[in-house]
Each structure stands twice: as structure tokens, then as C-alpha cells.
Image: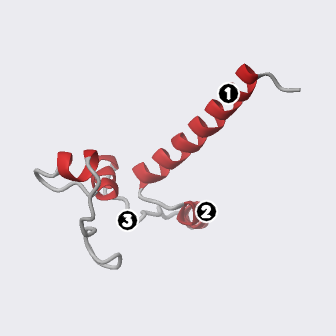
Amino acid sequence: LISRPSLCAGCFLSLGALGAWHARLISRGETSVEQHINSKERKRLLQLGQVYKNPYNFGVWMNWQVFLGIQPGSFFRHVLFPSCHAPLGTGMTW
């Protein structure tokens, strides 16, 4: 059988890896599906001598602000407390 400490360590490592993966996706302005599509597109354009730029990547800081719904003066209200604020943009326009 598996001991409790090894089970806890396995869960901690698995959830830590999952959290790191999603933090990376948020930092790059991608979903998991977009990450797959964008990596294929990067490879395709690299063969053509071009560089792919993700249109939804606004930079690490702005990507996290969009993800958390942070607007000027709204950190405590939108991040630390539950809120039902409207997202920035419509999902199609920003």
C-alpha cells in the first residue's frame, strides 16, 4: 500500500505542476487548446521564415490583470473578495 506521506507528496507535486502549467498559460494569454494550436502555428511560420505573435498576449502583467479582472483601484474588490464584475471586453473585442 501507499503511505500517507508519499500520497500527500504525490498530490502536492501533481497539483503544483498543474498550477504552474496554468500560470504559464495565463502569462502567455492562452488557453490549453490555443497553446496546442499556437505551437503548431509557430512551427509552421518558422519554416516560412516568419514569426507568430499571439493576438491575445498583452504581456505577462496585463494578462494577469485581464484574468483577475483588475481595473484601476479594484484590486481588493475584485481579487480578494468574491465579485460578479463584468469581464473586460466581450471576448471578441477588448
Quadrant (top left, top right, bottom left, bottom right) of the C terminus: bottom left
The residue at which mark 2 appears reads as: 36
**Mark 2 or mark 1: whose residue is earlier in sequence:** 1
Residue 3: x %, y % from top left:
80, 22
Q: Callout 1, which amino acid? A: Cys
Q: Nearer the viewer, residue 32 or 56?
A: 32
Q: Nearer the viewer, residue 65 or 7?
A: 7
Q: Residue at x 52, y 40 (%)?
A: 20
Q: Compute the Cα span from label 1 to label 3.
A: 37 Å
The residue at which mark 1 appears reads as: 8
**Mark 1 or mark 3: whose residue is earlier in sequence:** 1
Q: Hey, which quadrant is residue 18 in on the image?
A: top right
Q: Residue at x 50, y 62 (%)?
A: 31
Residue 2: x %, y % from top left:
83, 26
Residue 53: x %, y % from top left:
42, 63
Secondary-structure class at tag 1: helix
Q: Hey, which quadrant is residue 66 in on the image?
A: bottom left
Mark 1 is surrounded, within 10 Å at the Cα level, by few (under 14), some (14 to 19) or many (20 or more) other residues, namely: few
Mark 3 is surrounded, within 10 Å at the Cα level, by few (under 14), some (14 to 19) or many (20 or more) other residues, namely: few
